[in-house]
Image: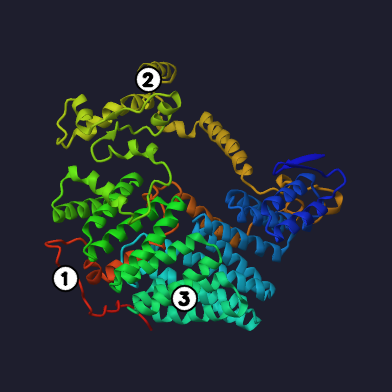
């Protein structure tokens, strides 16, 4: 048979399923996950009657798709692996499949389900006396809880350590599992696993506001990374140490760690992390009031952000450069970067950034005595001086028309999500109307509090009619029923009528088929050849057993998350900036260091304003025990 994957044909006429699987495993070990997945898929299509071999193929194929970030396929094959392992009574295999499912669900943000499967892995590993599996399960549970807590922290505005009780509880549970994992891997003598545990303990204590504890764990992580020559882990440790030291007010020491982070990122040719290090150094030197050095690093960050097409990162860099130039008294250059920040904020839909940039532009124009007509000459004069790199590295003319009307006009509102798509597919231009024009069409004052409902009724009237029933047909049907029904019949007697019983029997038979469709059946597993040799091992079909209470408890936990799937999702936090560190980091710095950061903002009663302040920053309050 001939198969075609990755654009290269290969023939498996003579190859066995095991040989294809071994080749797939070899390719995955050297990092070629796409090629490995292709061989594993070929092995599944060829099929095998060896249940252990098929289980291993499912597991490795799921892992390959995980690394390829095709998480839906990874979830599918790990579920196949779990079903097969349970069917043949392979407890160790069931535990590993549960752990793989937990890791995949974690990446998908389904944390409660992920914890359930990781806990199943932990229980089976302890039952079987598998210390290595137990350590992995403990680490995975801590990792899931850590990810859940981090997501919750990103969604709140508290200062470091000032967390809501549920977020604090989640992160504290994560530290408990990491500590249990650390104790066990020390017993097993696994130094690499110890390094991972130290690093994650440092990160969770950082989120909890325990910065002294975080520094202690990150230094342990740094020591092990150096011992193993793991440059990437060493770079992460330096960056994390700098972050924690910032919140303790030790800015000079933080810059040393950030410079080491920058050096290692350059050695590793990791432009994203190099840009993040420059961003962190620029902000730290701003806190130290060394504005010339801050500008150097922000310009480096800006260049990398432009090269990587990170518009959010460009906006952050321009914002920071504007503040730094204001502090140096160079208001004309500050105005240029503030205008660029305003332009980018409009383009990417950053409302808060747009308001801040607009305020800065207005204050700088007032300080310079400029008007709107002077802005074009200001920009050309500035670029002629050669004080900054040109931003026109890539054309953005296609985006100008999208944002230049943002503050004045909106697209015609319609609550049908498909209508704009339909217009675009039909090649029709999207109508642009002002709010006043839209409301004027229905004859209402825009200030009227009821105008929204009139607008809703106007655009949704046809859709609402689609939901209505035809009263004429309904009335005809009721008359026919009334004519054929005995006048003395009690409506309540319909419940016990034979026709009603038949109706419920019909529902039961129809729904039973739907329930059966959702049951796991080994006959549906891809690549499984059922023969006389393996039929006796397929316990799920040969010997059906009554489900235990544990099964129903697990089912309740698993199905509870399906209710949440129907809920309204939170608002989109907006585009992420790869060249900017986690948004929680310097936004927290701005709150903790509010007094010092305010000195960098635009406040221009005169050009000769004294902005120096040598008072040391007050360390943020937080539990450092």
Q: Is residue 428 above or below residue 64?
A: above
Q: Which residue is mark 1?
A: 610
Image location (x, y in percent) of residue 246: 36, 75
Which residue is at 41% across, 60% downward? 301
> Mark 3 and 1 residues: CB-CB less than 8 Å, in contact?
no
Asked if residue 614 lies left or right of residue 315, the reply is left
Q: Which residue is mark 2?
A: 470
Q: Estimate the spatial distance between the alpha carbons at disc 3 and disc 1, rounded to whole Å.
A: 40 Å
Residue 265 vs residue 546, the one in the foreground: 265
Which of the two marks, 1 or 2, is nearer to us in this view? Answer: 1
Quadrant of the rendered image containing residue 10: top right
Say which element carries label 3: helix
One can see residue 268 in this view: yes
Quadrant of the rendered image containing residue 432: top left
> Mark 2 and 3 residues: CB-CB less than 8 Å, in contact?
no
Image location (x, y in percent) of residue 514: 59, 40
Q: Estimate the spatial distance between the alpha carbons at disc 1 and disc 2, rounded to whole Å.
A: 77 Å
Q: Which residue is mark 3?
A: 202
Query: Is the C terminus in the top left, top right, bottom left or bottom right quadrant?
Result: bottom left
Residue 527 vs residue 216, the one in the foreground: 216
| Crowding near the residue tagged with mark 3, few <14, some 14–19, many ≥20 C-alpha atoms within 10 Å | many
Which residue is at 21% across, 24% downward? 441
> Mark 1 and 2 residues: CB-CB less than 8 Å, in contact?
no
């Amino acid at each position: 048979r001939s198969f075609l994957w990755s654009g290269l044909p290969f023939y498996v006429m003579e190859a066995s399923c095991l040989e294809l699987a071994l080749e797939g495993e070899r390719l995955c070990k050297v990092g070629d996950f796409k090629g490995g997945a292709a061989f594993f898929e070929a092995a599944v299509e060829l099929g095998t009657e060896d249940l252990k071999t098929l289980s291993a193929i499912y597991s490795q194929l799921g892992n390959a798709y995980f690394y390829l970030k095709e998480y839906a396929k990874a979830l599918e094959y790990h579920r196949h692996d779990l079903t097969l392992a349970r069917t043949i009574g392979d407890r160790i295999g069931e535990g590993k499949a549960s752990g793989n499912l937990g890791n995949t669900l974690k990446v998908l943000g389904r944390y409660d389900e992920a914890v359930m499967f990781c806990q199943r892995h932990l229980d089976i590993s302890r039952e079987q006396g598998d210390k290595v599996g137990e350590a992995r399960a403990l680490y995975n549970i801590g990792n899931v809880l850590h990810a859940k807590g981090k997501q919750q922290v990103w969604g709140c505005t508290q200062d470091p350590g000032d967390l809501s009780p549920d977020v604090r509880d989640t992160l504290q549970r994560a530290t408990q599992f990491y500590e249990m994992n650390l104790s066990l891997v020390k017993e097993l003598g696994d130094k690499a696993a110890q390094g991972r545990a130290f690093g994650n303990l440092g990160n969770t204590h950082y989120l909890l506001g325990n910065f002294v504890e975080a520094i202690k764990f990150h230094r342990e992580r740094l020591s092990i990374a150096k011992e193993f020559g793991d440059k990437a882990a060493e770079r992460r440790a330096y960056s994390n140490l700098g972050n924690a030291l910032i919140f303790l007010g030790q800015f000079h020491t933080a810059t040393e760690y950030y410079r080491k982070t920058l050096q290692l990122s350059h050695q590793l040719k990791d432009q994203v992390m190099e840009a993040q290090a420059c961003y962190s150094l620029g902000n730290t030197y701003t806190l130290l009031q060394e504005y010339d050095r801050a500008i150097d690093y922000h310009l480096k960050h800006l260049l990398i952000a432009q090269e990587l097409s990170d518009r959010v990162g460009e906006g952050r860099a321009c914002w920071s450069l504007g503040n730094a130039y204001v502090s140096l008294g160079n208001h004309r250059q500050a105005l240029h970067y503030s205008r660029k920040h305003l332009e980018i904020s409009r383009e990417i839909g950053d409302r808060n950034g747009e308001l801040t940039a607009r305020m800065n532009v207005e204050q700088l124009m007032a300080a310079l005595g400029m008007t709107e007509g002077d802005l074009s000459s200001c920009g050309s004069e500035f670029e002629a001086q050669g004080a900054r790199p040109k931003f026109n590295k890539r054309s953005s003319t296609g985006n100008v028309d999208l944002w230049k009307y943002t503050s004045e006009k909106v697209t015609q509102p319609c609550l049908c999500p498909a209508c704009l798509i339909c217009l675009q597919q039909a090649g029709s231009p999207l109508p642009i109307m002002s709010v006043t024009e839209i409301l004027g069409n229905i004859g209402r004052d825009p200030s009227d509090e009821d105008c929204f409902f009139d607008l809703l009724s106007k655009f949704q009237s046809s859709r609402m009619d689609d939901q209505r029933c035809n009263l004429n047909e309904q009335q005809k049907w009721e008359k026919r029923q009334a004519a054929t029904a005995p006048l003395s019949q009690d409506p309540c007697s319909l419940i016990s009528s034979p026709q009603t019983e038949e109706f419920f029997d019909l529902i039961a038979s129809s729904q039973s088929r739907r329930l059966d469709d959702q049951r796991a059946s080994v006959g549906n597993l891809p690549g499984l050849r059922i023969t006389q040799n393996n039929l006796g091992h397929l316990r799920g079909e040969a010997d059906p057993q009554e489900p235990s209470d544990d099964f129903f408890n697990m089912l309740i936990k698993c199905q509870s998350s399906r209710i949440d799937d129907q809920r309204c999702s939170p608002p989109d936090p907006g585009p992420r900036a790869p060249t900017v560190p986690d948004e929680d980091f310097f936004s927290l710095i701005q709150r903790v260091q509010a007094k010092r950061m305010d000195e960098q903002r635009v406040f221009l009663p005169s050009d000769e304003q004294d902005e120096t302040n040598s008072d040391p920053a007050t360390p943020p309050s937080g539990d450092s025990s």
